[in-house]
């Protein structure tokens, strides 16, 4: 799931620390690198773009990859829409602001869906960088209801919307929301 990388539209918390233009630049380059890393014949890569009209026509994203609109609503509404609208079968949704995502992590998620109904890639802040559903049965109608987004409760709240699903968790990764996250990322990479 991607947003068109315009200042003030993406990474606004990071933008408060380093400036909106610099945070949009970071997101654009992080997203482009992520897309390059995730190209793999084992899965289809589909870009869910916001805002809908502008994102679908954007020159920022690779022209060869299919794009779908995210639509309106909060993050849960937009993710649920993707789970309902993409062809049946195992599916994972990720955000674009997690530098640690790579093909190994995505393969790990799809493997977990082999014997689980749902998989989560936790983020160290209590949210998550990936949610995957096997989708062998209908997507729960209350998926993502009453989730406290952008809080330390997002993962637990989302898991609570899947009470009768066998869930797995894979590797915890760090997302980048603030300048402290950027510093931690640089430190972890030895920079």
Image (cartoon, rainbow, N blue to C red):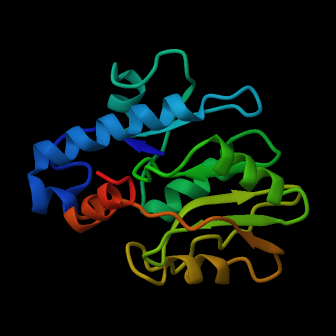
Q: Nearer the viewer, residue 138 or 127?
A: 127
Q: Position of residue 83 (x, y in %)?
A: 67, 52
Q: In the image as oriented, which residue stretches furthest toward the left?
A: 19
Answer left or right for 72 relative to 77.
Answer: left
Residue drawn at (61%, 28%) of the image: 39
Q: In the image as oriented, which residue stretches furthest toward the top?
A: 64
Residue 166 in the image: above or below residue 21: below
Q: Position of residue 9 (x, y in %)?
A: 23, 48
How many marks do you count on the picture?
A: 0
Q: Nearer the viewer, residue 168 or 54?
A: 168
Residue drawn at (38%, 53%) of the image: 189
Whether residue 117 is visible here, answered yes or no, is: yes
Residue 55 in the image: above or below residue 181: above
Residue 33 picture quarter: top left
Residue drawn at (38%, 21%) of the image: 57
Residue 65 picture quarter: top right
Answer left or right for 167 relative to 124.
Answer: right
Q: In the image as oriented, which residue stretches furthest toward the front?
A: 190
Q: Nearer the viewer, residue 46 or 28?
A: 28
Whether residue 4 is visible here, answered yes or no, is: no
Q: Position of residue 183 (x, y in %)?
A: 25, 61
Q: Nearer the viewer, residue 107 or 130?
A: 107
Residue drawn at (44%, 80%) of the image: 148
Q: Position of residue 38 (x, y in %)?
A: 58, 35
């Amino acid at each position: 799931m991607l947003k068109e990388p315009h200042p003030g539209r993406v990474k606004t918390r990071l933008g408060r620390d380093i400036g909106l233009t610099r945070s949009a630049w970071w997101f654009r380059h992080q997203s482009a690198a992520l897309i390059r890393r995730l190209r793999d014949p084992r899965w289809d890569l589909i870009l869910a773009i916001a805002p809908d009209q502008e994102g679908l026509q954007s020159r920022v994203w690779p022209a060869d990859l299919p794009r779908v609109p995210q639509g309106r609503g909060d993050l849960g509404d937009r993710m649920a829409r993707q789970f309902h609208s993409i062809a049946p079968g195992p599916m994972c949704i990720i955000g674009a602001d997690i530098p640690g995502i790579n093909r190994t992590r995505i393969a790990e998620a799809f493997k977990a869906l082999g014997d689980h109904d749902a998989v989560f890639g936790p983020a160290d802040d209590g949210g998550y960088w990936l949610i995957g559903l096997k989708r062998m049965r209908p997507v729960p109608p209350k998926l993502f209801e009453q989730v406290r987004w952008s809080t330390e409760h997002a993962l637990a709240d989302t898991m609570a919307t899947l009470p009768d699903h066998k869930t797995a968790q894979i590797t915890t990764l760090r997302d980048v929301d603030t300048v402290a996250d950027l510093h931690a990322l640089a430190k972890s990479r030895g920079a």
